[in-house]
Image: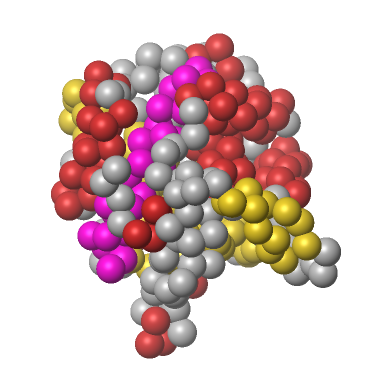
Amino acid sequence: MNCPPAYCACALLAFCVVPRGGQDKPIKQVTRAIAEPPGEKDLGKRAYKHVARLVAYGPRTPGSQARANAADYICAHIKALGLQPIREAWNDKKEKLRFENIRVVLPGRSDKTLLVGTHYDTKVELDHEPGEDEQAFTGANDGGSGAGLMLAMLEDLVHLKMHKPTLEFVWFDGEESLPAKWNIDRALFGSKHFVKKHLPGKAKGGHDYGAFVLLDMVGHKKLAIDREATSTKALFPPIEAAVAKLGYGKFFFKKDTSVDDDHVPFLNAGLPSIDLIQFEDNDEWHTYKDTMDIVSWRSLAIVGRVLWQALPAIEARFLG
Ligand SMILES: [Zn+2]
């Protein structure tokens, strides 16, 4: 098994008692053979359930009650896992909107942090066929898939006791452009806010982030993750190796694309970042057809397992 000691330290099944975040009552956890990612059906079905729950709240546009409900759901699940959600809300005076990012930190033996993120908001106005604006845009794949998958991954990652770097998950609000037509000045609110707040450099009180992996539209039933051109080139080999190891070659990097997404503010701040996104073969993108009908539990599982498998190599390269 090609994995650094950090991920192999708990290769044998063992029981241990750990304090539950912020509470006195200990819970029994199983430290698992973490070199192996969770099974497809196991991870995929749990992720799908979370996506469906989030989508059921309705359009999760910035400032909406449904967006707040989705945030509450994410935070409640984080708490149920014994972790502490960090809610970071702010008012955007210009847009007259209140946004909210949600973070959770899995402390490691080092402060050096690998950040994994996604957005959980949905688009306000669509830019496709006339008339579609009036229909509900549920954002099952675009806004739901990454958010649900990360919750399911957290259910497994919380059991990893010996990972060396710190892992942080973040759910961004306000990724989508507020106007129908893309306007980067009125989009990426959550990631811009995060970078401004947390990436001033460790010396100035910021966090010690080593790399960022973004998940966006990762649940399409005809999964085809693109090679996103603005992403940091050196982050592809760990992902490619994981894809090859798991036999998922046909689902990854067959097409090139280039998108403005939540990784852009991080790239601009100098943090190595990759966007795992299905943008090219995605006819339902920003249409009312982006519903649970186009989301597949297996696709969610495939992306999650690849990320899981790639974590040690990413950490070895960027967080050593
Ligand atoms: Zn979108």
Q: Is residue 54 left or right of residue 210?
A: right
The N terminus lies in quadrant:
top left
- Identify the residue at horizontal 72%, vertical 38% (top origin): 66
**Which quadrant does the C terminus fall into?**
bottom left
User: Is residue 43 placed above or below 234 in the rendered structure?
Assistant: above
Residue 221 visible here: yes
Magenta-highlighted stretch: main secondary structure? helix
Q: At 19% across and 23% down in the image, what residue appears?
A: 254
List x then y, in percent, for residue 43: 54, 30
Relative image position of residue 189 (x, y in whole percent): 49, 55
**Quick check: is 137 in the magenta stretch?**
no
Residue 288 visible in the picture: no
Q: Is residue 145 above or below residue 203?
A: above
Q: Nearer the viewer, residue 239 or 125?
A: 239
Q: Which residues are magenta?
A: 296-320
Q: Can you give x and y, in whole percent of width and height, for residue 297 in the image?
A: 52, 21
